[in-house]
Every structure is written in structure tokens, then in C-alpha cells.
Image (spheres, grey):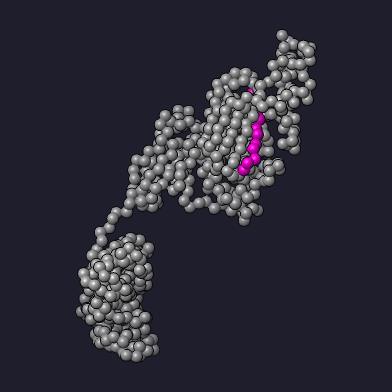
Amino acid sequence: MATKCCLIACRMLLLHCALLLLLLPLSSRTQKLPTRDEELFQMQIRDKAFFHDSSVIPDGAEISSYLFRDTPKRYFFVVEEDNTPLAVTVTPCDAPLEWKLSVQELPEEASGEGSGEPEPLEQQKQQITNEEGTELFSYKGNDVEYFVSSSSPSGLYQLDLLSTEKDTHFKVYATTTPESDQPYPELPYDPRIDVTSLGRTTVTLAWKPSPTASLLKQPIQYCIVINKEHNFKSLCAVEAKLSSDDAFMMAPKPGLDFSPFDFAHFGFPSDTNSGKERGFLKSSSKFGRQMSSKPRVDLHKICIGNKNIFTVSDLKPDMQYYFDMFAVNTNTNMSTAYVGTFARTKEEAKQKTVELKDGKVTDVFIKRKGAKFLRFAPVSSHQKVTFSVHSCLDAVQIQVRRDGKLLLSQNVEGVRQFQLRGKAKAKYLIRLKGSKKGASMLKILATTRPNKQSFPSLPEDMRIKAFDKLRTCSSVTVAWLGTQERNKFCIYKKEVDDNYNEEQKKREQNQCLGPDTRKKTEKVLCKYFHSQNIQKAVTTETIRGLQPGKSYLLDVYVIGHGGHSVKYQSKLVKTRKFC
């Protein structure tokens, strides 16, 4: 009995030695196989960089590594006893993988012609190297795939991986104690994400909690991923998509050792942040230029703690979005994907199209960032059509389409006139888009009769100029520009406080409010004015009967033949206090 135990111990020792010799070319230092029986295992697991340049898979720890396209990679681990439970998990990140798991059994009989002596070391190594081994499992694709066995034979296990599409990185986890480890959060019996509410810019999601949190009381947080392209199979795939493509330009060339320093700049977690959530790729300042992280704007990851309901906001109307949910064990930083879903946000409420009548002014109100649609369908044939727009407050955008074809797209401040070529039986669709600053008000007129214009012609400069040297204690003198068209001008004054500021002035800048909204006591005078010489189209007026040292707000209105008025920019003046 003692001799048999001795032989088993010798076989195990020789197997470790043979594996050590196999791995010598892959590492610059001698490395002992880490297993659960070794006292240094926990220390080695804490130092994740210990395995980065190794082809050894540690028992009970997830490793991250890198594959070059069409360059296979092989990993090893040892199962020392028969009937051992075994679980292997391979997580592709940003490309499909081909992987295969096989085993070479330990030698059953020692050689030496029955002498009981073990085979020489070189012969043992040669036997392991030449044998292909028994294939246990193979897979090709980009799913997170598992091999699980409740009773595995002892032997040397080989994991072969290949990426045929592109350079990529991946994760591997292997354990001989799957029942007690459970590093990945468990999914509930119904792992789907439910869309409980749908709006134009919001989607509310709900899901059942992971039993790892509700039953085992382990710390679990949920991370939601939103994008417009497709669902993701793993959080590793999400992080690969979020990371800048430049990160992979620094990958070492095949055949060189991967040092922990290299991996720190590969998008793989280092030992310094192993307990933190893996997020966007972070680079050191030394490599900031080459390694700048540029998250894609159409992919967002939000970690929300342990809640199991969440409303995603700031979405676009009538747009399809894909939603993925990942349960993350904050102790192990390992994650499990729920079954992703997708949903299309609701359309914007269809707005009523306002019909424009030929030659009639229409008032339009637009909410902040809103839009209004108008339709003009001339009843008779026409050579030209004229659109006149009077923006009362901030600038608005106007687009005009004729039978679906875009003819005009302009921003409008004040009064603008656009003349377009007509077409028999044509229909015009006008889209008016409001300001981002606030609500917009405007007047619009469409006509096929060019001579029928309700709005007055306007000068390029609509400011009122005050002459400081002509100020007195009871009067001020002002001037403004006119046009070659004879129009009616009316001046109004209003006394204001000395602390009257630009904000109050801005609120009164509605150019569409006409003289009919003013008090009769504020009226100074009305007069007609024009000049055939545009250079001399200037008029002045002295406003008398003012109080010394008082401030006044002056307004000039120009009134067109159709009766519609346009207000010049208000002017704040102050009389002299002492004369």
C-alpha cells in the first residue's frame, strides 16, 4: 500500500515537472501551477498581473487576455483527481471566438519493466506533448459559453482559442469548485427585461432581481446599456465598444511577452482597480495622446445600484433603441447578462397643419424648440409666390417645400420677404421652427399677387439714434432711417424708472405689438416720410415736454399700406437734470 501511494505521488510530481517544462518558452521565469491546494494561491489571485503573461489558468479566478487575428492561443490547467467537478466559462468581448477544450489523461502504468520505477522525465514529457488528447467541448460564436461537468477525469486540460475576424480580447474563468464559488450573479427564473412604459422621449424598464442578491445577500448592482444598433451578449463586449479603437493600436506584437504594464494600457483591469467597476478605458497622462478615450455617443452605460426598475430619459421620438441589463457582483466584478430587449419610442404628436389664405396675414405661436406646419395651395395658376415673414421676438427658421421639393431654408429676424417661382396646381408646405431661447411669435403672409403687400418696407438698420449734445432738461432729439417707399411713422414715449435695465427692455421688444396697444397719452406724433435717394432717407424729431432728470423709453412704429406695423428697436433716453 505504501508503495502504491508513493507511485501516485511520483506521477503527480512528474506531471507538474512536465507541464513546467512545456511552459518554459512562454515565460521568462519559472512558474509553479497555481491550484486550490497551494498556499500561495490566494496571494497570487490578489496579484492579477501574476497570470497576465502566463498560459496557466488559475483555479477560481477570471483572467483577461488578447488574441491576434488568425493566431491561436493555448491555455493549460491540471485536474489532479478523478471525479472532480469542473466549470469553464469563455467570454468573447468584441469578436466571435473559436475555442476547444480537451484533456490528456495521466499515465495509468509506470514503465521500467514492472520495476515500479516511474518513467524518465523526458519520456513523460514526450508522451504528454505528442498526445492530441480527448476533445470535451468546442464552440464557435460570440455568446458567453460554458463547459460544466460534475465528474471530470484527472489530467492536463488544454483550452485552445482562435479569432478569425480581428484582433480581440476575451475572458476565461475555470474552477474545480463551481458549487461554492458562484462568482457570476445568478439570473432569475425569468431573465427578460420588461418595457413597462413607453413615451416619446422615455422608456421605463423593469426586471426581476438576481437570486444572488435576494437570497444569497451578495452585493449586486445593475448596469443598463442603451444603443441604437443591437443587443450585447456581455458587459465585456459593451466595454470594448465604449473604448477608443486607438487602444488596440498599442497591442504588443505576436511572440513578445505580455507584461503587466502592457495590459494596464490594453483596456484590461489592473490590480489597482480590481475592486472597482470597470467602465470607460482610462489611460495614463503619459500616453494621453495615443490612448485618448472617445466613447461613442450612441452607446450609453448607466449603473443604478440595486434597483430593479429604471426610466431611461432624453431619448429621441420615433427611434428604436436596444436595452441590455447586466447584474454585476461588486465583490468579484464579474457580470451576467439578462435577456436584452428593444423598443421604439412614440412618434411626436402630429401637429395640425394651418391653411394659409392668399394675401391674408396669419399669426403663429411656437413653443420653445417647437415647430409649426402651414400649407398654402393657390386656387389659380401663378408665375410667382411671395412669402413675407415677420418674426416678433427671436430668430425663427423657415423651410418651404413645393410638392415635396425643398425650395427654401432660411433663418429670419425682423421682416423678410421671399419670392419663389410658381407652378400650376402646386402645393406649398411651410415648416416654422422656433428658437431654443424661448417661445416664438411671428406673422406670415403668402400671396400670388406681388403688388399686394401688407408689411411695410424696412431699412437695413432699425435702430433709433439719440443726439446727446441736443439733450435738454425737457427734450431729446432722435433720428431713424426710412426707405424709398412712403410710409407712416408714429413715435411713442413712456417714462421709466432710473433702474430700468436691459432685461426689462428685452421683454418689451415684441416687434409685432402695434400702436393700438399703447396708451393715447404716450403718443408723441405721426408723420409720413420717404426719400427717393436712399442715402438721404433719414428723418429727425425733437420730443418736447419732458421732465428734467427723467428716463424715457422711445418707440417708433412704421405702418404699411395694409395696416400692419413694425416696431423699431426701443431706445432708452434721459433728460438733463440741470440746465
Disc tally is: 0
Q: Which residues lie in the magenta part?
A: 69-80
Say which quadrant the N terminus sits in.
top right
Q: Is residue 576 visible?
A: no
Say which quadrant the C terminus sits in.
bottom left
Q: Is residue 344 magenta?
A: no
Task: Identify the residue at horizontal 35%, vertical 68% (top origin).
Answer: 407
Give the x, y percent position of residue 354.
Answer: 24, 63
Give the x, y percent position of residue 254.
Answer: 68, 43
Task: Identify the residue at horizontal 66%, vertical 21% (top origin).
Answer: 105
Q: Quadrant of residue 429?
A: bottom left
Give the x, y percent position of residue 513.
Answer: 26, 73
Task: Identify the residue at horizontal 34%, vertical 82% (top origin).
Answer: 459
Q: Quadrant of residue 415?
A: bottom left
Task: Identify the residue at horizontal 73%, vertical 31% (top origin).
Answer: 22
Q: Residue furthest front?
A: 424
Residue 323 placement, left or right of 149: left
| Position of 409 relative to 520 (above/below) | above
| Position of 254 relative to 153 (above/below) | below
Q: Nearer the viewer, residue 68 or 152?
A: 68
Give the x, y percent position of residue 390.
Answer: 30, 73
Q: Nearer the viewer, residue 533 or 329?
A: 533
Q: Nearer the viewer, residue 575 or 137?
A: 137
| Position of 578 relative to 94 (above/below) | below
Q: Is residue 290 visible?
A: yes
Residue 403 placement, left or right of 231: left
Q: Is residue 79 magenta?
A: yes
| Position of 331 relative to 425 (above/below) | above
Q: Nearer the viewer, residue 331 or 348?
A: 348
